[in-house]
Every structure is written in C-alpha cells, then in structure tokens.
Amino acid sequence: MSVHGASHHHRRQLLEDGEGDSSLVLDPSLNFENVRMKNAYIALQAWKAVIVSDPHGVTDTWVGSDVCNYEGVFCYQSPDNPQERTVAGIDLNHQDIAGKLPELLGLLFDLGLFHINSNRFCGTLPRSFVNFKILSELDLSNNRFAGNFPDFLLELPNLKYLDIRFNEFEGKLPKKLFNKNLDAILVNNNRFSSVIPEEIGNSPASVIVLANNKFSGCIPESITKMTERLEELILTNNGFESCMPESIGDMKNLTVLDVSGNRIKGELPENMGEMESLEVWNVAHNMLSGKIPARLCMLPNLESIDYEYNFFVNQTENCLNFVDFDDRRNCFKDRPEQRTKSQCKMFLARPLDCSAFGCGQPPELPPPALPVAPPLSPPPSTPAPSPSSPPPSSPPPPLPAPSPSSLPPPPPPSPSSPPPLLAPSPSPIPSPTPSPSPIEPPWSPQPPPTPSSQPPISSCPGPSPTPFTCPPCPSCDQKPPSSSSASPSDQPEPPESTPPYTS
C-alpha cells in the first residue's frame, strides 16, 4: 500500500471509530500541500471541537489549512520525504486548557514529541496513540487523566521520556514498563497501588520517580542491578515496608536517593558509604535503627542529608557539619528534640529479621506470548530521536519542535520553577514556546517542606456548550498513604502536613 493509501486508510478508520468526531466536515475550498497536512488538519480540528476552555486563546489560531501556523504546533520535513512538511511536535504546556483528547489525534503519525503539561485535560488517553511510531517524548503531567496505566504506550518503539505525574492514574504498574528502553520514568503523584516488580532492575532509565502513590511491599533488591545507569531514585511517601537492599552501596552513579515517608526498617548497609556520586540522601520518616555509616557523611559530593523521625542511635561528627541536615526524633544522646528513652527502649528491644519480608525473589516468568494482529501501519517513517543522556544508538536528525531542556528529573525548565538538579536532556527541537517544567529537587523535609514546583491542577473543566464527558474529578489534594494504626513507637511520624512531592 502506498504512503498516501495507508494514510487514507488510517484516516477513514479513525473517522469511523472516533467518538464524537463524525460531525467534522471539511471545507471543500481548503487546499492542503500534502496528505499529511490534511490528516493534521482533521486531527487538530477534532481536538479543537472537544476543548471547552482555552483562557489564553491558543486554539483561536487554529484556523485554515496551514496547520504549521497554529500556535503550539511545529512542523518539519517528513521523515520519509524531505520535500514534504509534516507536523512534528505539539507543545501546549502551561496553557490551562480544559477538554479531552479525541481518537483522531492518531492521525498525527509523524509526531516526535507531545507536550501538554499543566492543563486541565481529563478522561482517558485515546488508544490511537499507538500510531505515534516515532514519538520520543510524552509529557502528560499536571492534568486530570484517569484510569489504569495506559499499557498501549509501551508499544511505542521510540519512546524515551515518559512523564505522567500529577494525574489520577491508578492500579498497577505493568512489568513491561521496566523492560522498555526509557530514559526517564516519572509517575509520581498518582494513585498507583501495587508492589514494585523485580523487573525494575531491568530498566535502562537514569531517573525513576515513584513518589506519592500507594506502592507497598519491598524495595526490590533488583534495583542494585542498575549500578551503571540509574542516577536518581525517588520513592517518597508510599507504603514500602522492608529493609534496605544489602548491595545498595554498589550504585556508584546514584546522585539522589530519597526513600523518606515509608516503613523501611533495620540497619543501613555499611556500603552506603561507598556511593561516591551521592548528592542528596533522604531516609527520613521511616523505622530505621542502628548507626549512620561513618563514611556516608564523608562522601565528597553529598550536600543534603536527612534522617529525622527514625530510631538511629549513633552518628559521627561529620554528619553534623552539613548545612542541610536534620536528625530530630531519633535516639541520639546529647542531641536536641530526640525521642523519649521509653520509646527508644521499646522499639530497639524488638528483634528484626529482614528475611521475613520475603524480598529479593526472582521475577515471575512471563506467560507465553499469544499471537496478536499487528496494528495498521502509518506512513513509513524513520526512528525518532532519543534523549541525549544516556546516548542511544545514533538516530536520524531530530524532528524539530519545542525542545525540553533537560531531565533533572524532567521535564524541562519553566519560568516558575527552579533549575533542575540534574538529568538527561531530551532531543532538541527548536521552538519559540517555553519547554516543559523541570522536576524539582526531591522533598527535603525541614517540616513542613515547601513545594517549589507547580502543584497539581486544582479544578476540572466546567460545563461545556458541546457534549463532553469526563470521569468525576476527585479532590486534587495529593496525600501520602496512611499507615495502619499502631503505637506511637511503632509508627514513622509524618510531618504535620505533607505537601505534594515536588521532585
């Protein structure tokens, strides 16, 4: 089938299957420079039709057949025909637009990036996203999307950067997520509730942020397999209950480790003092005991250290020299604001067997694969560019479009956010509009911590003049999961108020 034939077949199928899109009628007087532009016009007009609030008037510019002049839409030469232009990127970050995503967006076959963070889009993601075969960057953060993790996103062969934080996704994270060749996995501040599969150790990601969900069970031993690639691991405010992985000190490239706000028990492995790249270390609000490894507080790059609200009994003078540190509510002698002697005695007298948590089991074997009919092929395309760190195999020149600056933990900078802590940078695509906001440095509980990144959107789309249905929007306040009731000495003590994690 020819490129134009395949494109026409896809367009016809999407027009037949798309919900609420059948009323779209093309003006016969419009002229399009190629079939790709006609597809893009259909997709963008269908999207405009289901937008119910656009306070900055972005979609008011979405008029006429030249979609490359639409605000937030970026074009470049098509991947298989340099003589033709195509829509290569969408960037509607920070526009406060309310609405949903129609199935006809799947006609944008040549998208290299799709950035819509900090809006009020709701509902579920259209399955037609499987057509985005060269998409490398997907940023849906700070919206009102709901439902289970959209597994079909894992079918996108060139996806490197996935940011779905600050939404209402729930259920389990699929094991396949960690077998995908992603450089950044940002799912914090949702409603996911499951154990983290041992497959996490297979991930090539440099940044993994799972904070402020309802995860439980063990911190998988397999994370220590990621010694060469993982730079930031942020698990704050979940329900993890286990000991620290014994070989965690092998993670020599880790710069940020934040496991605060869980129920982690036992003593810290002595080899944590060998994590030579570590800059931020936070184990606050857990149930750890024993001593702070002496070498940990002497690491050359360490800038921030927090271990308040635990049951530690010993620390060295080096630990007290940090400008940014907190050791309150432990069992240290001659230190202010510690736990009572009775609390410490009661807790420390209880024996602990880390093996009882059942951590470190090998991952389950996957079920036998069933034959699946392949999806219809979009027009032939070249592989999408991938983020620059860690460098993948050389792709063809990147598609132009708004360029996210760097994955700090990502996304890239906005005027209202402080500079990123660090991160890999997604591929550059020139554009005049601001890039996505970066992930902030991990929460450093100097009670109560102050979030510095943009909080979740606090309102849902209002009534629409056209038919529009989204799931009910629950409260936008993100709260860490509460632990089951127990005696004060049995519980990690959270701050009086815990704002959303702002990694």
Image: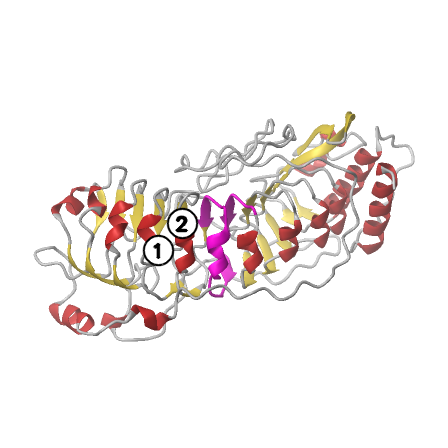
Amino acid under label 1?
A: Val
Residue 480 against residue 209 in the figure, above or below:
below
Residue 433: x and y, percent? 58, 30
Q: Which mark is residue 233?
A: 2
Is there any visible trace of residue 275 in the rendered image?
A: yes
Amino acid under label 2?
A: Leu
Residue 406 against residue 500 in the figure, above or below:
above
Residue farthest to the top, as pictured: 83
Left or right relative to 361: residue 319: left
Residue at 57%, 60% in the rendered image: 473
Queried whether the magenta region covers residue 94, the answer comes back as no
Q: Which mark is residue 123?
A: none
The secondary structure type at the circle numbered 1 is: loop
For label 2, the crowd category at 10 Å Cα-Cα, with few meaning under 14, some 14 to 19 and many 20 or more, is many
Is there any visible trace of residue 22 in the rendered image?
A: no
Mark 1 or 2 closer to N-term? 2
Queried whether the magenta region covers residue 189, the answer comes back as yes
Residue at 74%, 36% in the rendered image: 381
Q: Quadrant of residue 172?
A: bottom right
Residue 368: x and y, percent? 65, 65
- Give the residue at mark 1: 259
**297 or 13: nearer the viewer:** 297
Mark 1–mark 2 Cα distance, whole angstroms, equals: 8 Å
**460 or 399: nearer the viewer:** 399
Residue range in magenta is 181-208
Left or right relative to 58: residue 276: left
Residue 274: x and y, percent? 27, 46
Q: Quadrant of the N terminus?
A: top right
The secondary structure type at the circle numbered 2 is: strand
Left or right relative to 239: residue 28: right
